[in-house]
Amino acid sequence: MKVQALHFKKQLQWLASCCLLLLMTLQGFGQQSVEVTGTVMSDKGDLLAGVTVEARRVAGNEKEKYTAQTNDKGIFVFKSLIPGNKYDFSFSFVGYEANAYKAYTVKRSGEKNSLLIRLTQKSNQLDEVVVTGQGADISKRRLSSNVTTIKSSELENIPSGRFDQLLQSKLPNAQIRLTGGQSGATSIIRARGVSSAMVNSTPIIYVDGVRMDNLNTAATVGGGSTQGAAISSIADIPMDNIERVEYINGGAATTLYGSDAANGVIQIFTKKGSRTGTSITAEAQIGVEKSTNDFLFFDRTKDLLFETGLYQKYHMAINGGSDKFGYSFSGNFLNSSGVMLHNQNRNRKIDFSSGFRAPLGKKVMYESSFMFVNNQYKRNRNGNQGGYTGLWFAESGASAITGPKFNNKLDQLTDSAFQVMKDYVDQAERLQDDQIRVNRFTTSQSFKYTPFKNLVVKAAGGIDYRVLRDQAVSTNAYIAHTTGKPSVDQGSITNSERKYMGITLEANAQYTVNLGDLSLVTTAGGQFFRTDDQQVSYSGTNLRDGMRFISTAAIRNATDFYGELVNYGIYIQENIGYKNKLFLDLGIRGDGNPAFGDNIGIQYYPKAGISYLLSEEKWFEPLQHILSSARLRASFGIAGNLPQPWSNQRTINSGGFLGEQVAYFGKPGNPDLKPEKTQTSEVGIDLAFLNDRIRFSAGFYRSITNDALFIVPPAPSTGQFDPQYYNVGKILNRGWEFNTVVVPVKTKDFTASVNFSVNTLYNRVLSSGGRAPFNINGFSARTIQTVVQEGFPVGYIRGNYGVFGKDGTLESFTPQEYLGTTIPDLFGSMGINIQYKQFTLFANADYQSGAVANNWDAQFRYNYGADNGKIAQAEVDKNGRLNWLNFTNMFIEKTDFIKVRTIGLLYNIKSASKNSVIKGLTIGLSAVNPLNFASSSFDPEATISGSAQGQGGATTGGISYATYSAPRQFIGTVRFNF
């Protein structure tokens, strides 16, 4: 009986278990999950891809959390939510305010579960992540200095043929000026003054971590003219596959770049694909180009030298991928006929860019980019190139001494006389032959290894390889026509070639740890770059017309140059945060370089800074309805400028004399040569008002360049000829930086924003170590130069100062006097952007004040009798025009200006159907360089390129001489998004 009872008991237990299991199964069927979908849009109606969506169920102590992400159509899907349960949905996306949908009750199967969510774009930029100056990713709130970020959406609507022009008016605390309107012309880029008397103020430029060739002056061999239009390496940097641009303008922010970053750093990050599917863009820009005639002295010059040109640019891009894999491709074709006669400034550019990212296992992410540019353009003669140049002939009055020797007062010519001149100029322009071809290849490869959550190790490397070939042919026909003298043996050809290869390698590691209220971000790494610069020029004279090879010339010559630069450094940085509101930023870099003297070891560059977010304090909360955020920052840092390669070495020159070899002294060498170091102290404040509708930042900086490199000529008693670099100077720059962005109106259909920046600047050479003044631009000492001298601004204008009597005649003159500074003491930018429904209107401009320049064209006009300018007729009657160089001060003008860089109007059409092949269409009209307001009679930006001390040398402009202004462009745009 006991056995039976035990058996029966087990059967009951088994039966109860089955019933319980059946009950649970039935209950499960009763709670079968359903699908919940939704669409996320911006407040402007754009579908947002990549938004993180969380669904959280809260029922008593039970918590369930599900995560999804929107696709390229802004749609998210949850497939595991239970009908009847309530969920809180949260939505987060970079650059947008977080949003939530609370207590949504999931409907039963068969009923539609669909949500529509709108996210508002953020104005606060403190939580943006940047890389430049930090070695690895870090939030802006942790930084003690300012980093400017420009997103692709801010650049894509600006028509531009080159990268530096694209950034004009976009960098609030920097000034970018093209020195001329010819294709490939150099630019003057500066922010916090001129920190060096020997090194150009152009920032170093990186693309995806690869250091680019940023030569912005004439090369040692070829590459244009220091007294005319030089050729810039920046003009062919790819710019149509950009994700964002980061810019730091010196000081502590550039310390981790070491010996070559005193002028700031621009870093371009290219696209590596999308995380939410594939998008395709096809775009066409077509328009006309017109010469800028605002600054021409003679009305007829525009008819004499210019014609209307055609501008075309075609662009196609593919961007796609998923969470783990991404790819992008961009192809562009630009064809501009220019505004010079006979297409003598034609520009054709083809470029391709691609980006790629993919995981290599679970812990390694690989990224790569490839870029190729083929840039071809023509040049016509300008500046001080000798012989006939169009602007010198027409605007400087040289038509009186050129060829048939015309009446140089163009506007007084009869129609028939002007036609004769026009025929002469047409032939002179047609016979010019100067062609430049650039091929550039850049690649970047990086690996990011995350062995565990808080540690990221990155290794990156890449190459920038650029080949420039400049062929200038001067035929006998051209020489005979422009001089009026027969020529059969004076034809010449010059082929100049520059090959640049830069290799960049970098490895770093970043470790992040949170210790209660403290957060630590430690970054350490090393960087190596090497550049090889090979230049050669072959020239031939006594060349028959039609020949284009040096081998066909009766007389052949060659010259070459080779420069090699190697720099290596290691750095470590510690960023310490307290309660996510107070941050201490510390770092140091040590650099070695073969250009340093034998007595100089590793050079060190420290930095320290603090960032304090007052708006994170509890006592600040009552103010936040008015003052959204507030941050104080202060920093100190040192960055450097490298001396020229091999300038520390004692050299012997070798050459020929009367057919024999000779040797003679070269550079004397300097065993104590080291980089010049710029130490910068700065303080600043960043404020946001009315929920970030008003953003304001202000800062003050003071930079001292110690051990500034000055060129020192040898004493005659040494028997040496070549000058030598010495660290003997000291240069001061200081100023205020203000930037404001205001959004006065922001509704569903209408948004208006205005930005305005103001920068002040004081520049002085505090000490030259007792060395004599030297020039960085201009001509001979008896004419005009821009000079470096103790007690004056870098690159001030020096020339003869004349004093006139009451009768208007010259009484006396003082040679080599200070005539004014070429560096403005006030500059900035401004812009407006208005969006109404599908329309967008935008405009950008910049300005400067406080500088002067010499109108060399006007001085020549006086010399050749075309116009007296400010000189009284009594002086001409008494002395003729012999004193034309003795009162250069009479041809100095203020260069205050406001220039509108771009005005544009866009109309955006979005597809009404989610399944449409064409997702959007943009139609636009834009004007480039449409308006100029200047105090000078000449273009204050169009100056000879300068850099008289050689390749990569300093220049500040200041001399306007036969230089073309940038043309106006009126462009229509059609862009399809698929």
Image (spheres, helix red, strand yellow):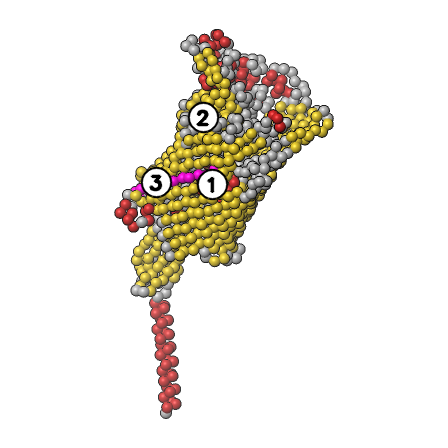
Callout 3, which amino acid? Arg
| Residues in magenta, as a range | 678-691
User: Which label sits in the foreground, 3 or 2?
Assistant: 2
Residue that label 1 marks: 638
Q: Residues within 10 Å of mark 3 (few under 14, many from 20)?
A: many
Which residue of the protein is positioned furthest toward the top in this rendering?
A: 877
Give the left or right position of residue 618, taking residue 441 as reference: left
**Of callouts 2 and 1, which one flags the residue occurring earlier in the amino acid sequence?**
1
Using the numbered discs, state the Cα–Cα distance from disc 1 to disc 3 in whole angstroms.
Answer: 29 Å
- 535 vs 678, left or right, is right
Question: Would residue 867 be counted in the magenta stretch?
Answer: no
**Which tag, 3 or 2, sits closer to the chain's start?**
3
- Which quarter of the image is occupied by the N terminus? bottom left
Q: Disc number at residue 821?
A: 2
Nearest-to-viewer mark from 2 and 1: 1
**Could you tell me the amino acid type at mark 2?**
Thr
Is there a contact, CB below 8 Å, between mark 2 and mark 1? no
Q: Is residue 749 visible?
A: no
- Circle on res. 713: none
Q: Position of residue 63 (x, y in %)?
A: 34, 63
> What is the quadrant of residue 467 in the picture?
top right
> N-terminal of the two: label 1 or label 3?
1
Query: Percent position (x, y) of residue 287?
Result: 47, 31
The residue under the point 42% across, 53% down is 520
Q: Residue at x 38, y 33 (%)?
A: 758
In percent of the image, x 50 and y 9: which residue is there? 879
Would you name the residue on which mark 3 appears?
A: 695
Residue pushed farthest left?
A: 622
- Looking at the image, which is closer to me, 295 or 946? 946
